[in-house]
Image (cartoon, rainbow, N blue to C red):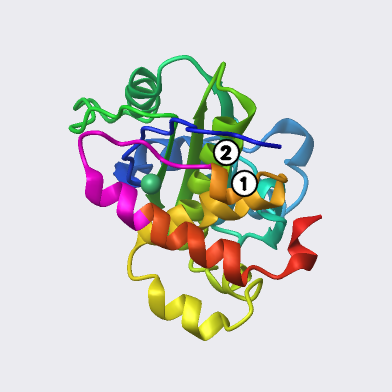
Amino acid sequence: MNVANMALERILKGVLLGVLCLQVSLSRGIPSRIPESYSHSADAYIQAKISPEKLLESYFVSKGFITGNIKIPELGVELTLQKNQFYKKEKEVTDIFKRINEIRNQFGLSTPYPDYAKGYGWCGVLYAECSEKKGFGYIILVKKNLNEANKTHASGHEGGHFLWYIGKQELIYQKFKKSDFIKSQIQKNEDFAILCGWIAMKKAGYFLNDCIIINSKNPEIEKKSDRIKNLVRDYLRDKNLR
Ligand SMILES: [Zn+2]
């Protein structure tokens, strides 16, 4: 496939959405009255009690998050999340900035998101605490109606932010020849996401020499993206391409 002058104008960073407290849900989680059917048993109350971990899980699940095994097909990555990690990807987002603020609202975070997010994708993390147990909800948003190239690139890029947040960068570095060298070239979360964006493109069959990121406002980003693209072109192992 040949994609000339592919415009990928996007400068997004994964950002912590905010802190959330579950104290109210906790007090509701413990039944004030033992259900009729259990009342004969001394174990009843213990059975009916919900642990903080379970409460965090049902909270995130009720908001559409999943846990356990996660796949990021664009990067050829499969992993198992820890019990307190939750994941959600929304692929058909009309307006990223509007959606971030909707999610903030849904989680009781009233202040509007400070950075105007302009671009094709976004990745953020929500943190929730319940009786000193912590839960983390990772969200990936990808804009709808993108062409195939931009969709692939955005999914790979935001998947990279997610892997960086959960500390699973090794899953990516091991796909490269000279993986220590690649690691030494990647300093920050954003570098890593750029790397993953290009991996997704190469894996999908795009010829990387024909793909460029156009960012008229910041030529430095174009330069950096090009440098990282060449790492993918030259060092990604062929077996990762199918
Ligand atoms: Zn980014």
Q: What's the magenta region?
A: 211-224
Pointer 1 local density, CA inside 10 Å: few below 14, some 14–19, many at least 20 = many
Q: Which residue is drawn at 30% across and 36% down?
A: 215
Q: Is residue 84 above or below residue 114?
A: below
Question: Tag 1, which secondary structure?
Answer: helix
Question: Tag 2, which secondary structure?
Answer: strand
Q: Is residue 206 left or right of residue 103?
A: right
Residue closer to the observer: 58 or 40: 58
* Amino acid type of the residue that numbered disc 2 sits on in the rendered structure: Lys
Q: Does the magenta stretch include residue 212?
A: yes
Residue 209 visible in the displayed image: yes
Q: Is residue 119 above or below residue 140?
A: above
The residue identified by callout 2 is: 88
The residue identified by callout 1 is: 201
Instruction: Give the position of the C terminus as an image quadrant.
Output: bottom right
Residue closer to the observer: 182 or 45: 182
Q: In this view, does 31 lie to the left or right of 112?
A: right
Please tell me which of labels 1 and 2 falls first in the chain. 2
Q: In which quarter of the image is residue 111?
A: top left
Residue closer to the observer: 110 or 25: 110
